[in-house]
Amino acid sequence: MAKRKNQKGTPGFDFHSIKTVEDAFKKCGQNIQKLEDLTMIPEKYRHSIWSAFLLMVVFDAINDGWEPDFSNHNEARYFPWPWVLSSGFGFSDSRYTYASATAYVGSRLCTNSAEKTKYVLVQFEDLWKSWLLGMNCEIKFE
């Protein structure tokens, strides 16, 4: 069986400190400048796939070592549930489940609290728009 990551996280870590994609990369010890070239992905999918990857890094940073254990049916996991409205993009709620066969937005994109889930959806709204709606939002890197 694979060894589980630290479920307790870094002492004193505040997930609100992850305000940008750069913050997430730093927290995860990754260098965004060293990523592979994405030109092998068809152009019409490239931006959406890139955004999904960035969201995975953001969730890793926000979760601070916590990883969902899908073999544990007693563990609560919170999944974002964005709502696309005619007036724009909004936050509906945070879904939480002990066990479910439904796949809302992907198993990698979950947290262990509703507060964290809502924060990621609101703070990184452009990434969600880019991934879910295929919108070419400007994603800036310092």
Image (spheres, rainbow, N blue to C red):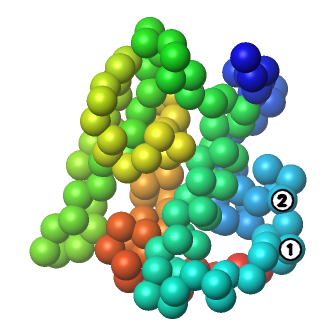
Q: Tag 2: Cα neighbours inside 10 Å, few (<14), some, or many (≥20)?
A: few
Quarter of the figure with residue 63: top right
In the displayed structure, 25 sits above or below 7; it is: below
The residue carrying mark 2 is 30
Q: Which structural element holds mark 2?
A: loop
Q: Tag 1: Cα neighbours inside 10 Å, few (<14), some, or many (≥20)?
A: few
Quarter of the figure with residue 54: bottom right
**Is there any visible trace of residue 63 in the rendered image?**
yes
Labels 2 and 1 touching (C-beta < 8 A): yes
Q: Hey, what amino acid is under mark 1?
A: Lys
Work out which quarter of the rendered image holds the N terminus and state it.
top right
| Position in image of residue 100 (x %, y %) | 31, 25
| Residue at x 58%, y 73% (from the top left corner) | 50
| Residue at x 27%, y 42% (from the top left corner) | 93
How many marks overall?
2
- Give the numbered dot on residue 34: 1
**Is there any visible trace of residue 119 in the rendered image?**
no
> Position of 33 compared to 60: left or right?
right
